[in-house]
Each structure stands twice: as C-alpha cells, then as structure tokens.
Amino acid sequence: MIKKSEILVMGEQAKKASMGLAKLSSRKKNTILEAMADELDARRKEIQAANQIDLQEGKKNGLSDAMLDRLELTDERYTSMVKGILDVIALKDPVGDVMSTWVRPNGLEIRKVRVPIGVIGIIFESRPNVTVDAAVLCFKSSNATILRGGKEAIHSNRALAQAIQEGGEKKGLPPNAIQLVQTTNRSAVKELVQLEGLVDLVIPRGGESLIRAVVEDARVPVIKHYKGICHIYVDKTADLPLAVDIVDNAKTQRPGVCNAVETVLVHEDVAVEFLPMLANRLISKKVEIRGDAATCENIPEATPATEADWGEEYLDLILSIRVVPSVDDAIEHINHYGSKHSDAILTESESAKKKFLQEVDTSTVYVNASTRFTDGNEFGLGAEIGISTDKLHARGPMGLEELTTYKFQVLGTGQIR
C-alpha cells in the first residue's frame, strides 16, 4: 500500500472534523472558544518563549525591522490576541441564518440559509497572531482549518496551534478541527492547495510572491489580495493640520502592514502650504520621501520618484507623493496604480466626497480617516481572517459571514413539476 502524504492525511482529517463542527450549537462553540482563550492565557510565558526563539533566529537571518515587528508577540499583542477570541464569542454566529425566504405560486417555500464552507486552508507568513485569529473565526463559523505559517514563525505557530486545539478539546472541540502544517517545506503549500474534494477554500496572507505562487498552483478556490498599495488624496478643501496627522498615522504607526499608506496625492492648490508641513512631520520620523517634480520643489529632502514607485508596496518608512490638479486626476491615478485595497480622501467638499466614494475602485474607501482602520477587528467583525480585493464572494476585511456560503432549503407539500 502507498503511504499517504502528511498533507493528504491532514485534508482527510479536516474533512471529517468539519462534519462534527457542523453539528455544534452556537452555545457549544462559545464554550469551546472560552476554553481556547483560557488555555492561551495559561500558556502565555511558554508561547512568548517560543516567539523569542523565532525573533532571535529572524535577527540572525537578517529579517528587516518591519518583518521583525510583524513577528513579535509583545505583551500588548498577546493580550489583544486573547481578547480577540472573547470578541468572537460575542459575535453572532452566522451559521443557520435565513438570508431570505419566499413562497412560489405552487406553494413551495424556499429558504436561503447560511452554512459553513467546510475546510479552509490558511497560508500566511510572519505574523503568528494569524494562527489564532484565523482558527477561531473559522471555528465560530463551523469550518475546519489547516494552517500553514512561514518558517520565520514556526516555533510560535506550533505553540499557538497546540494551545487552542488542546484547550478546545477540553470542552468538546472535534479532533483535528485546527491543524498546523508542521513542515516549512514549500512543497507542502502546493500539495495543500491542490486537495480538491478535501479543501474547499484557501486564503493566503502574506507578500505578493507567496500569494501569486498559491494562485498559480491552486486547484481549489482562492481568496486573496496581492498588494496593499493604499492612497490618501489631500483635497484643496482639506483641513491641513488634520491631514498631516492622518497621513502620519497611516504611514508610520505600523509601516510594514498592508493597510499602511504608500502614496499620497496632493491637490496643487494646497501643495505649497501642505507639503512642507507634511515633510516636517515625516522626516522627523525617518520617512524617506519620493516625489514628482512639484513635490521635490516643495520638499528639498525628497528624491525624484520613478514610474515604478507609483506601483510599489514599500512596507517600510518610504512614501511616494504626487501633486495632482483635481480630484478626477487623483481618482484616475488610484484606479490605475492602486491595488483595490484601501484608499482615502481628506476633504471638506461634499461633492468631492461623493465623487471619490462612488468612483474609486477599491474594496475599502475612506473619507477623512486613516487607511489603517482596514481590519476586521476595527470594523467590528472580530479577529480578522484576511482582506480580499477580489470581487466575488468576499471583498475587503473578512469576518464570520464571509466564511460561510449558503444553500437553498425547499419545503414542499407534495408538489411535482
């Protein structure tokens, strides 16, 4: 007999677990989630010690400061991760919701009802909190999960996955409902995304190269975003001191994440006043500015931007700036160079707000707010499973509802066609 591969076995185990998950009541799932949170809390020192091993190895391997920041489980982030589970408990379980119902002329009653997707593969890179966020959201929506994290977080991920699975089992979590691929070999990813009939959906979270590799190899549906090229347009009617604060937050609070701003567009009528104000703030925080000719005129420290800069996701303290003559030009720039992730307008003009909201092709559009809010938790969706820039099934930050599909329940009284 040919020995089954580890990934195939995991797929079969996950499929079996998904059948058990579909039977759990909302109350039972919440009890299990409480046990997961308790177990994580109890194992804090053990898990943070594993995280320190990953950080030490990351430094030896030359990971950037931004990547090390993504990797670190600080006390604050750890507490937030545990709280995220409790937040998910408080969320309404979407499974079983009747989305709509109607009766046909022949008396058939038709219901459109939310159901779990089944087995979801999550492929991610350096942020170990994704292990918990993804697993608990999938579990609350009655989906089994196969997690495959990056090698840079392997010790953290193993400790986290073991804690939530073992903690959940104390209160009735089916075996293998949450599984972590133990190997960091890339061939495991290819095999996972080709498990037709066992894995129902794959969600990759990470850099563009990882996501494109997943899409290229996949034989199962994939929900993803390739880049986070986020824009902020400062309109001629913007409150300029407020605009400085918003751009500063969107660029410097956590530059290594996908909802950080990468390009700022400035209306030419306020460029002379606004650009030095912005540069004074950003340069003090060691932000490198790359700009067009008008930007370089107003910011002596800026370096000329190249065509490649407008389509670049820096994930670092680098910002490109372009001066534009109108809101229409800003929208045209965003729709051409953007990644359909998150884009904002800073303005006091009602007509500019309306135009921007309607015409920018993006998953998440803001008026007078930082792009850093594109996050499932910030949107009140609980811990986040990912952000989609696709247009089918899910778009933007994904929460519990986006982890369900639906089926039609048809109730008859003997009708025949």
Image (spheres, helix red, strand yellow):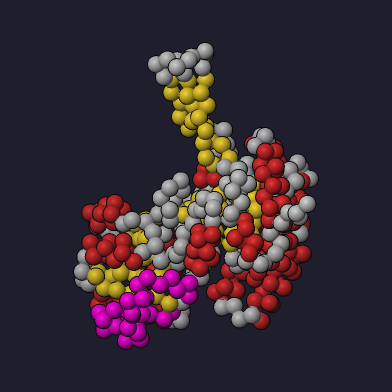
- Answer whether residue 22 is visible to the viewer in this image: yes
Quadrant location of residue 227?
Answer: bottom left
Can you say whether 237 is above or below 322 in the image?
A: above
Left or right, 87 with respect to 300, comes to right
The picture places residue 4, in percent across and down from the top left corner, at: 73, 54
Q: Residue at x 69, y 77 (%)?
A: 56
Can you say whether 334 is above or below 273 in the image?
A: above
**Count of numbered circles on the image:** 0
Q: 272 and 181: which one is in front?
A: 181
Q: 69 and 190: which one is in front?
A: 190
Magenta run includes residue 306:
yes
The picture places residue 299, in percent across and down from the top left corner, at: 31, 83
Q: Residue at x 42, y 15 (%)?
A: 106
- Answer whether residue 81 is visible to the viewer in this image: no
Q: Residue at x 56, y 78 (%)?
A: 64
Q: Residue at x 43, y 77 (%)?
A: 318
Can you say whether 161 is above or below 272 in the image?
A: above
Magenta run includes residue 290:
yes
The picture places residue 78, in percent across and down from the top left corner, at: 66, 61
Q: 254 and 123: which one is in front?
A: 123
Q: Residue furthest bottom?
A: 300
Which quadrant does the C terminus fall into?
top left
Left or right, 361 with respect to 166, comes to left
Region in magenta: 287-316
Quadrant location of residue 130?
Answer: bottom right
Can you say whether 51 is above or below 397 in the image?
A: below
Q: Residue furthest front?
A: 1
